[in-house]
Amino acid sequence: MYRVVHFELLSRHPERTAAFYGEVFGWKTVRGTGDYLRLITGCDEDKGINGATVRPLNERLPAQAVNTVQVPDLEQSVATVCEHGGRTLSDIIDLPGTGRFVYCADPEGIPFGMIEYAT
């Protein structure tokens, strides 16, 4: 069974979005590359996951939350998504020092991400 390990809030205004969640929930913001702002939702001992806010890769995507699922083999998981009526929304993206990532959508068009962490 694969688990959600990360979330992204796709936003046209990532800094404003990060500030909102910081003010409402006390989340911390750590600047990444470009418009990518990591959202730290608690201490390492806390249950839950961290996330980020970022501009959508495709401007046609609406502002929304996207959950990322950890998978052991990204290519095989992409093939399985497509075999079951889903589709990819991006090419596989290399994340230096972290792994590889891809945006997908289920048969209803609901977006999600998949990540294969580097070992």
Image (cartoon, rainbow, N blue to C red):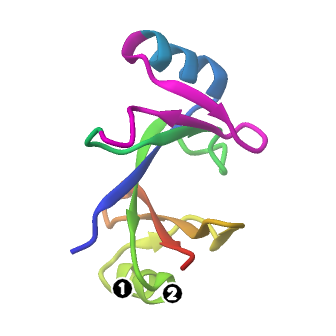
Q: Is residue 4 above or below residue 86?
A: above
What segment is highlighted magenta in the picture?
Answer: 24-45
SS state under label 2: helix
Using the rendered view, name the quadrant where residue 97 is placed: bottom right
Residue at 32% in and 57% down: 4
Q: Of residues 108 and 74, which is closer to you in this image?
A: 74
Q: Position of residue 17 (x, y in %)?
A: 55, 22
Q: Position of residue 77 (x, y in %)?
A: 41, 82
Residue at 38% in and 42% down: 44
Using the rendered view, name the quadrant where residue 93 is placed: bottom right
Mark 1: which amino acid? Answer: Thr
Residue at 45% in and 81% down: 78
Label 1, label 2: how far apart the Cα atoms are: 9 Å
Instruction: Provide the residue designation for mark 1.
Output: 80
Q: Is residue 106 above or below residue 82?
A: above
Position of 62 with respect to 68 (left or right) is right
Q: Nearer the viewer, mark 1 or mark 2?
A: 2
Q: Position of residue 81 (x, y in %)?
A: 37, 78
User: Is 28 inside the magenta-drawn segment?
Assistant: yes
- Whether the residues at callouts 1 and 2 have beta carbons within 8 Å, the answer is no
SS state under label 1: helix
Q: Which mark is residue 75?
A: 2
Residue 106 seen in render:
yes
